[in-house]
Image (spheres, coloured by chain):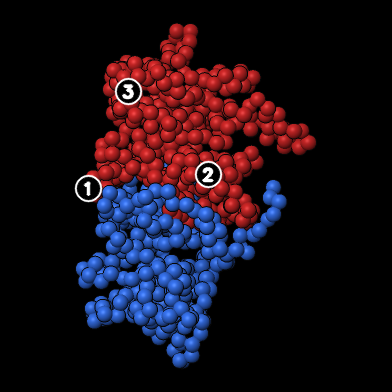
Chain colours: A red, B blue
């Protein structure tokens, strides 16, 4: 049908989004922040409203062979709330649309919604609407989350300043290792269905991929401490990719120290079993849903008291580039090396 | 995997939604109206915000053989805006998420977005975010629309009163006939690819299915005339189904007059070619995206001046049932006889 045919893979994910949004116009006076961040911000009569949306597709974002439906429902909500928190906002409402083939029974859909409601309860948000539909194949889940924030108190990706500390919550790479474990067990099961899965002592990393928690606690702590991050993003695509987003959108360079990247013991040990460098899991693995943010160094004394936050680098002039300093002291250019060429991207 | 397996078809679309939302709790003080209407209403610091969402799945909601991508993008937005208007609100913002297989080129996705942006321009809304992803098969589009309304000036499905006039905008059944024409041409093409499609003089009905327009004009007129409908819904599933929604949620009966149902000449003539009763197309065909609403009879004098609005019946006590009076003067119980057992439903 097309006279010209360009493969999406030739543009890449961010190229496609740039292309699709390049002529996007703003008509509404209430549009404070549009495409290009974790969420959009609209002014609602003095206070501000943050909106974010995600689409999860079976076979792309999850594999029903090892994803319990209750966990999937929980995760579908959690990853959206993570985007709202990544704006330093508080989620209040969600809508959930699903489409599913006749392979799914009512009981299966019940389980999915048990997880959805569990996440709503845990994070105090209301499910206010949605859409259900059949699908020719597989399960599709679309969640839109709405949050609130005091006027202009939201954090974007573009506000970092030279000299700011680069910080990350929790630890990284666990979700990627959890995924490798599940994929390994799936292969073993497909080869030898009688073999029982061997996932003892792997509960942390398996939990990271199957049931991520958005970092509401970090946002609340920063608000309590009156620390306003200069920029913030959630880590869905790996530390490299997210750091480069902050650098690009803030027009800065950075220096990131490999030995400062927080990695859980189980993640590290399991990565070594797989012959993967633990730092590589953190840098290039996705789905950790931690918060990556920059803060003014004046807040350093407060920060070090919170053991859930690691200072992993600092922001530099754009002329200094985006630098990763390895444990051995060498420096490399930081590159976003996602595991998929075209998986998904928010805009 | 399930111990018990109940087919979704055994519950039906509304049964499933009732089941999934029966334990839904409201935690946020700002939640004014939750699941069960065309849109949800949340309080945003004095004014109110209406949210609605739809998921469109290739092979269920559209057939790429006869759906130009630009029209599809336009329609995906239009049907969401229709839900916002059906709350008597004004749409302001949308998010759009898409997933697509590698069958779709960049140029194809460009076309889809041309339609999306055209609808944004036509209805003065801002595209503020979304998500792009690959899919194992086909195209999936999820749109969430946000609108605004003065406090408590939104119309629900549940406010109709006994004696209210039942009104509908425009005409009905055209989209269903348009779909029959496209399906017929598809069958002919698949049998004999050299035959040119014969769709001359069918532009109105084809346009109704491929490029519906939400009735912004009706909402604006009602607001200008200071007529507040007591209940309102958009006609996406056929007049019978939507009328029954208003009756059920307002706890009333109704009397609907077949001879008052507005049907376009082209719709009527083509329906007769297909040996279908034109009224059946209006009552049971979907996707007309007109507005069905009830108003206090005191407004009758104003209403009759607007030729875009037809009074098609009135609301009665619940004990009188939901009655369709035919052209011949007979009465039947109004039943929702959708063309699909489980297609899609908003909640």
Residue B292 visible within the image: yes
Q: Disc 3 on helix, strand or loop?
A: strand
Q: Chain of mark 3?
A: A
Nearer the camera: disc 3 or disc 1? 3
> Is residue B111 positioned above or below B335 on the image?
above
Residue B179 point in image, percent of width and height: 47, 68
Q: Is residue B277 left or right of residue B160?
A: right
In-front residue for pair A225/A188: A225
**Residue drawn at the location 40% of the way across and 18% of the way down:** A305
Which residue was labeled with disc 3? A295
Q: Earlier along the polypeptide chain: callout 2 or callout 1?
A: 1
Q: Chain of mark 1?
A: A
Circles 2 and 3, Cβ within 8 Å, touching? The answer is no
Residue A76 visible within the image: no
Residue B195 point in image, percent of width and height: 50, 68
Q: Is residue B241 left or right of residue A20?
A: right
Which residue was labeled with disc 1? A29
Residue B34 point in image, percent of width and height: 42, 56
Which residue was labeled with disc 2? A118
């Amino acid at each position: 049908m097309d006279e010209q045919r360009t493969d999406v893979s030739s543009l890449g994910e961010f190229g496609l989004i740039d292309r699709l949004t390049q002529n996007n116009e703003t008509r509404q006076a209430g549009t404070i922040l549009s495409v290009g961040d974790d969420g959009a911000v609209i002014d609602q009569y003095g206070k501000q409203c943050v909106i974010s949306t995600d689409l999860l597709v079976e076979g792309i974002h999850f594999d029903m062979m090892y994803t319990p439906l209750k966990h999937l429902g929980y995760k579908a909500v959690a990853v959206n709330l993570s985007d709202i928190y990544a704006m330093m906002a508080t989620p209040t409402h969600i809508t959930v649309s699903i489409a599913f083939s006749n392979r799914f029974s009512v009981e299966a859909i019940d389980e999915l919604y048990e997880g959805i409601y569990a996440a709503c309860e845990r994070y105090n948000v209301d499910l206010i609407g949605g859409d259900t539909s059949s699908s020719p194949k597989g399960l599709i889940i679309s969640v839109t989350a709405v949050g609130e924030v005091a006027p202009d108190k939201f954090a974007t990706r573009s506000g970092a300043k030279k000299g700011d500390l680069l910080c990350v919550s929790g630890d990284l790479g666990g979700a990627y290792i959890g995924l490798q474990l599940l994929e390994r067990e799936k292969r073993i099961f497909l080869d030898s269905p009688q073999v029982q899965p061997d996932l003892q002592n792997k509960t942390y990393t398996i939990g990271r991929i199957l049931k991520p928690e958005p970092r509401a606690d970090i946002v609340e702590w920063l608000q309590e401490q009156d620390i306003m991050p200069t920029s913030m993003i959630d880590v869905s695509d790996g530390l490299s990719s997210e750091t480069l987003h902050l650098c690009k959108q803030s027009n800065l360079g950075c220096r990131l120290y490999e030995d400062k990247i927080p990695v859980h013991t189980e993640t590290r040990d399991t990565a070594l079993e797989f012959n993967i460098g633990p730092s590589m899991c953190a840098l290039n693995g996705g789905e950790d849903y931690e918060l990556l943010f920059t803060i003014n160094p004046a807040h350093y004394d407060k920060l070090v008291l919170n053991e859930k936050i690691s200072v992993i680098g600092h922001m530099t002039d754009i002329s200094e580039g985006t630098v990763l300093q390895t444990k051995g002291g060498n420096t490399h250019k930081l590159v976003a090396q996602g595991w998929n060429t075209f998986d998904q991207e928010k805009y």
